Image: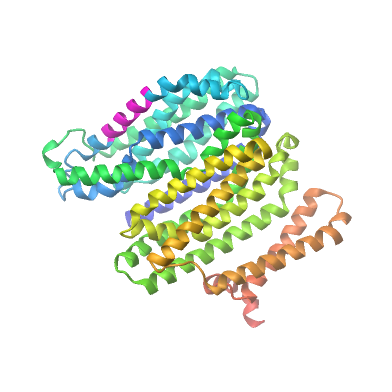
Amino acid sequence: MGIIARQTIKGSIANYLGVAIGFITTFFVLTDCLSPAEVGLTRILVDAAVLFSSLAMLGSNSSIVRFFPYFKEADGNDHGFFAWAFLLPLVGFSLFAILFLIGKESVVELYSERSPLITRYVLYLLPLTFFALYMSVFEASANVLMRIAVPKFVREVLVRLCNLASYLLYGKGLISFDLFVALFCSSYALAALVDFVYLLRLGRISFRLDTKFLTPKLVKEILSYTLLVTVVSITSNVQLFNSLFLGAKGGLALAGIYTIAAYIANVIGVPSRSLMAISGPVMAQATKDNNLAELNRLVRNVSLHQLLVASMLYFFILINLNALYSVIPHGEEYAGGMSVVLILGLSNILAQVCSPLGSVLTFSNRYVYALPFSLLMSAAAIVLNMVLIPVMGVSGAATATLGATVVYYAVMALFVGIKLKVNVFSWRLLRVVAVMSILLVLNIAWTFLVARHIPHLLLDAVLRSILLAAVAVWLVWRFKVSDEVSALIVKFLPFLRRS
């Protein structure tokens, strides 16, 4: 088995372990040990740190992957590449820290009325941003060395386990809230340290600068790409704006309610990560070869399967939402986020359908247009958040994301369709819509005709899910939504072949 296969398998295991730990932590520990306002604080600290690190990174994360082939030699010499890769974010962080300290009072004033708890811990954002920044840099460095498993385990498992420990210690009254926040932030410091030690142990990085290797042409190309990626990476984190705006406009409790709901809705996008990772290189090759027929086939196939998986997940989340909130500790305090799950779920489905277009644009020679599209999405998100949150609360934040997503992908689909001659539409997409429509009708019928005769909410959820899952499998096979999925269904349910 090759190194790529081994590292992919190990990375996937880390992903699924992280999802399992995150599920248990979010629904059964976090909601039990912290109040909605305290949940909101942790979410805002992390979201702000991720957003700020995108600014301080100066595009180095993507630049490491893009330009490492220019520096590496067959004998292992990298011409000081990793020294530059570690130095550039430090410069960016220093500039950010100066700006942050100058504007700190404005941040405090923004949150002082609705979320005074943030003002007590605002300085924690500096170290948290630093460690979030270098976690990403170290991960990218490990990736180009074909060693993704350990950094993936650190981010997906180690950080979550450390956070889980801090939640339990505080929830059981063993530590103060001040110490809890310090431990929560320290988990990211530990993660960055582990990643750094791992890179050192690989023995394949050098901190010796090679200034002679950098030609003016290469420097210009790196700086141009870095500037573009910096802006795009900041503007593309549109969902991070929601918790920040909610904390300022509605208070930490609303941010906490939104956090739990967003976690549920974001489950819809998890399966697509593997599919996009697998299909991305093939799309890149087809784009490079200008093979429009193959590119359209790939894009439509990926879009179809992502819509199928995303809509199925959304449907089963929808029919089990009441049951899910009923088993969450203090679920009644977070139940106001149900509308957020439904709205963000629609946004995630749209993103799953159209995300292949973003990949095509990035791989094409018109990749610079990703910048104005990202700016448009961010502007729409900011304006909609400012308008809708005061009126609709958490639902307003979710609606802002949905609106920004619609604007972003509508403009992108139009551009990619006209300029690159690629689109996601196929008649099989309508078959998915037909399957989901039938399932929704059956769910409504169950609600009015059967559910009232079942004494317990959880029993109803289990029975409803089993029955509708069986119907969903049959409909997907019967409507021939996907040849690949139909083959899998027949493989595990051979009796359908004889039907």
The vertical placement of 128 against 471, above or below, is: above
Task: Name which residue lies at 88% across and 56% down.
Answer: 453
* Residue 336 falls left or right of residue 140: right
Considering the whole magenta stretch, tell me its main secondary structure: helix
Q: Nearer the viewer, residue 119 or 200?
A: 119
Q: Is residue 97 magenta?
A: yes
Q: Is residue 392 left or right of residue 11?
A: right
Residue 327 at what x, y percent from top left?
73, 41
Name the one closer to the observer, 462 or 399.
399
Which residue is located at x 57 percent, y 24 percent?
A: 111
Q: On the rendered structure, is 35 left or right of 282? A: right
Quarter in which the C terminus is drawn: bottom right
Relative image position of residue 468 (x, y in whole percent):
72, 63
Residue 1, can we see it? no
Farthest residue, direction bottom: 498
- Highlighted range, magenta: 86-98
Which residue ends up furthest to the right in the rendered image?
A: 453
Give the image quarter of residue 295.
Answer: bottom left
Identify whether 499 is placed above or below 432.
below
Asked if one can make out residue 276 in the rendered structure from this viewpoint, the answer is yes
Q: Quadrant of residue 261?
A: top right
